[in-house]
Every structure is written in C-alpha cells, then in structure tokens.
C-alpha cells in the first residue's frame, strides 16, 4: 500500500547518533543564519502557527523524504529548489504554497558550499523521531482516514472531497495535471459551484418560509408543499455534486486517481 511504503521510506532515513560533529554544528549555524527566519527549526506552538512564514523544517523534510525516497535525491532537490524555486517542484501541497507563497531564491545569498552543508544537516536532523511517530500513527489509521475522506463526501464549499484534493495538489508535479486537464477541471468546478450556489440561495428562502409558516400555525398540508420543494432541491444539489465527481474522474488518469485516493480501490 502507498501509505505503508511511505512510512517505511520515512523511517529508513532516521539515523541515530550519540555525538554532534563539527559539520553538524556548522550546518545548524548556517541553517539558523539563512533559513530560520522563515522555517521554524522546532515544532511550532499554536501561537506560532498564526505567524509562521513557511512550513517548519520537520514537515518540509518529511514530505521531501516521502516524495523523493533517497537522501541523494532529497539533497539534489534542496540544492535546485533553493536557488530556483518552482511551485510545480514543491514537495508541499499546493494549498501550502498558496498559503505561504513561493520562497524567494537564495542564489547569491548562500553559496553552493554552504547550501550543501545546510542540506546535509537538514537531512540528518529532520523529521524528529517524535514527529515521525506522530505521522506513523496517522498513517497506520490510513485506511480509516481514506474511508472518512471518501470522494463522495462534501466539504464546506459543498464540493466533493475529490475536488478539494485536486485544489490542494493542483500544481504538484507528482500529480502531473497537464494544461488541458486543468482547463477542463476548472470548467467542472465553476459549473458545480454555480449550481450549488443557486440551489443554496433557493433553499435558504424556502427554509425561512417553512419556519414562518410553522410559527404562524399554518396547516401541515400547506407546510408540506414547501418541505417537498426543499427535498427536491436537495436531490438536485446531490446530482450536481455527483456530476462534478463523475466529470472529474473522467478527466483524470488511473495513476492520478491512485495518487489522490490511494485507498479508494483497496
């Protein structure tokens, strides 16, 4: 299973050491100098989460190791990304890039030699055992979470969960959406949101009318007419959402669906 493999690869990176070498110390100092103003080097407190400028290093390195799987590839990614940041190459979810923005290039700020030392320090240090233990527990419950995050469930925007996942991973190279797919998916999303918005507006009006009729002591036979209209609109909304799901699935490849919903076919 994808998530079990993720745990295995992540744990395989952890190296226990009983001493701190001179290069470790230099790596920590360089990281504090060039990186710590944006990326926290410790787990953020709830208060810090309100003001952080970028994901903490524990999360960044967890995603990097999970995506790239070997220390060599992780280091190469850091060396390339820090000097030439691209949203499509980010190891974090697209919604995180949207939230924090794309980091500025540090080309000319940090030397290649310094960045190499920083990279080695980050790979050796992060994520912490505590962080991995927490994530491992979450991944151990992955099948349950996969069911909870069924593509048929709706989120606060009244969109299928699959659509929300697409929004979160929109620019990730690992998902690999091409321009044609993105164009089609945007049309599907717009149609869905327009349809749901129209229905919600009508539902709000009908719900208010039912409340007023009930408060005024109107006969139930008259109230039932409004209730039936509400039921009809809710059924219409469900069909709009199911059409969104069906159209989205038709646009995606099997590999893309497996990436977004690894437990769907389990």
Image (cartoon, rainbow, N blue to C red):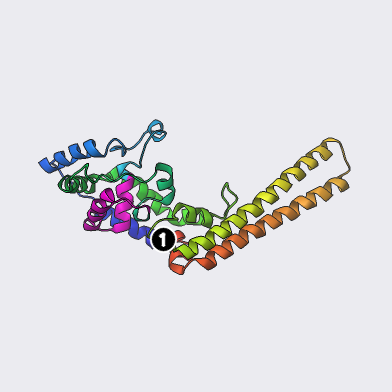
Q: Position of residue 214 (x, y in %)?
A: 82, 39
Judge left or right: residue 120 versus residue 243. left
Depth check: 98 or 254 in front? 98
Taking the view exactly as shown, the residue that stands out farthest to the left is: 22
Q: What secondary structure predominates along the stretch shown in magenta?
A: helix
Judge left or right: residue 89 versus residue 254. left
Q: Is residue 77 magenta?
A: yes
Taking the view exactly as shown, the residue that stands out farthest to the front is: 108
Judge left or right: residue 79 versus residue 213. left
In the image, residue 84 above or below residue 26: below
**Residue stretch rendered in magenta on the structure:** 59-87
The N terminus is located in which quarter? bottom left
Depth check: 124 or 117 in front? 117
Taking the view exactly as shown, the residue that stands out farthest to the top is: 47
Q: Quarter-wise, where is residue 142 in the image?
A: bottom left
For the point 33% across and 60% down, which residue is it? 5
In the image, residue 218 above or below residue 62: above
Q: Is residue 180 magenta?
A: no
Q: Position of residue 67 (x, y in %)?
A: 33, 57
**Around disc 1, counting alpha carbons within 10 Å, would you say few (fewer than 14), some (14 to 19), or many (20 or more)?**
some
How many numbered circles are shown?
Answer: 1
Q: Which structural element holds mark 1?
A: loop
Q: Position of residue 138 (x, y in %)?
A: 40, 49
In the image, residue 84 above or below residue 32: below
Depth check: 126 or 78 in front? 78
Q: Do we see residue 136 in this rendering?
A: yes
* Residue placed under numbered mark 1 in the picture: 175
Q: Position of residue 125 (x, y in %)?
A: 23, 44
Q: Do we see residue 152 in this rendering?
A: no
């Amino acid at each position: 299973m994808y998530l079990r493999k993720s745990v295995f690869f992540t744990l395989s990176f952890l190296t226990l050491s009983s001493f701190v070498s001179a290069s470790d110390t230099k790596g920590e100092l360089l990281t504090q100098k060039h990186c710590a103003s944006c990326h926290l080097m410790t787990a953020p407190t709830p208060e810090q989460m309100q003001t952080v400028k970028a994901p903490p290093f524990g999360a960044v390195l967890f995603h990097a190791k999970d995506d790239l799987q070997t220390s060599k590839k992780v280091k190469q990614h850091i060396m390339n990304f820090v000097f030439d940041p691209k949203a499509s190459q980010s190891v974090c979810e697209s919604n995180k890039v949207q939230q924090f923005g794309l980091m500025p290039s540090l080309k000319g700020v940090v030397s290649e030699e310094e960045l190499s030392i920083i990279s080695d320090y980050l790979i050796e240090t992060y994520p912490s055992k505590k962080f991995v233990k927490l994530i491992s527990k979450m991944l151990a419950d992955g099948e349950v979470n996969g069911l909870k995050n069924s593509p048929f469930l709706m989120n606060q925007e009244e969109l299928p969960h699959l659509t929300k996942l697409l929004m979160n991973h929109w620019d990730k190279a690992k998902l690999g959406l091409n321009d044609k797919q993105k164009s089609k998916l945007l049309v599907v999303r717009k149609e869905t949101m327009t349809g749901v918005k129209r229905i919600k507006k009508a539902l709000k009006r009908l719900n208010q009318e039912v409340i007023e009729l009930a408060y005024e002591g109107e006969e139930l036979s008259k109230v039932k007419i409004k209730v039936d209209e509400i039921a009809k609109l809710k059924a219409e909304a469900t069909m709009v959402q199911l059409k969104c799901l069906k159209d989205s699935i038709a646009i995606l490849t099997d590999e893309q669906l497996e990436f977004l919903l690894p437990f769907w076919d389990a």
